[in-house]
Image (tube, helix red, strand yellow):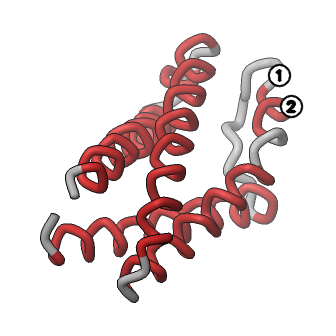
Amino acid sequence: MNDTTLKWISILSIVTGVGLLLFWIGFFTIGLAPDNPPQGYFEYEHSFPLPDIILAIALIAASALMLNGKPLGRHIALVCSGSLIFLGLLDFSFNIQNGMYTISLMDMLLNAFINLWCVVFGIIIATKLQES
């Protein structure tokens, strides 16, 4: 893998980690929940802050290590890739089963983007970091 690809994966991992942290800050402060959430929505969402925060920290740590040429960063990033894929698919499953994509156009676009980002970026990390 070339240095440019590694740098982009690192940068996007930092952005993803910061995005996860900002989501939870927003969720608990300004209320990012839909106006009329399905039954069980808050119970479901409240199970995610701890694993998401750990994932965010791991993504940022992996990036810092990779940018400094430390092999441990790649190993941590590979673990994060599986976590991202799992998170994206789990959220997709909940959203599709509970009509989250039909609440509003904004909810659909935001949820679909987040779910797709997690799965696709997780796959990119896994495949690109496996190459070398």
Q: Which residue is mark 2?
A: 43
* Residue at (51% x, 27% y) in the render: 89
* Residue at (67% x, 38% y) in the render: 34
State whether residue 123 is above or below residue 94.
Answer: below
In front here: 65 or 99?
65
SS for callout 1: loop
Q: Disc 1 marks which amino acid?
A: Gly
- Across and down, in percent, residue 105 comes to 42, 33
- Across and down, in percent, residue 75 comes to 47, 60
Q: Which of the labelled discs sits on residue 131, or is there none?
A: none
Q: Disc 2 marks which amino acid?
A: Glu
- Quadrant in the rendering for residue 12: bottom left
Q: Which residue is mark 1?
A: 40
Q: Is residue 43 left or right of residue 61?
A: right
The 10 Å Cα crowd at callout 2, few under 14, some 14 to 19, many 20 or more, is few
In front here: 11 or 27?
11
| Image quarter in which the C terminus is found | bottom left
- Across and down, in percent, residue 109 comes to 40, 38
The 10 Å Cα crowd at callout 1, few under 14, some 14 to 19, many 20 or more, is few
- Across and down, in percent, residue 5 comes to 18, 68
Q: Are marks 2 and 1 in contact (CB under 8 Å)?
A: yes
Q: Is residue 81 left or right of residue 120?
A: right
* Residue at (64% x, 15% y) in the render: 98
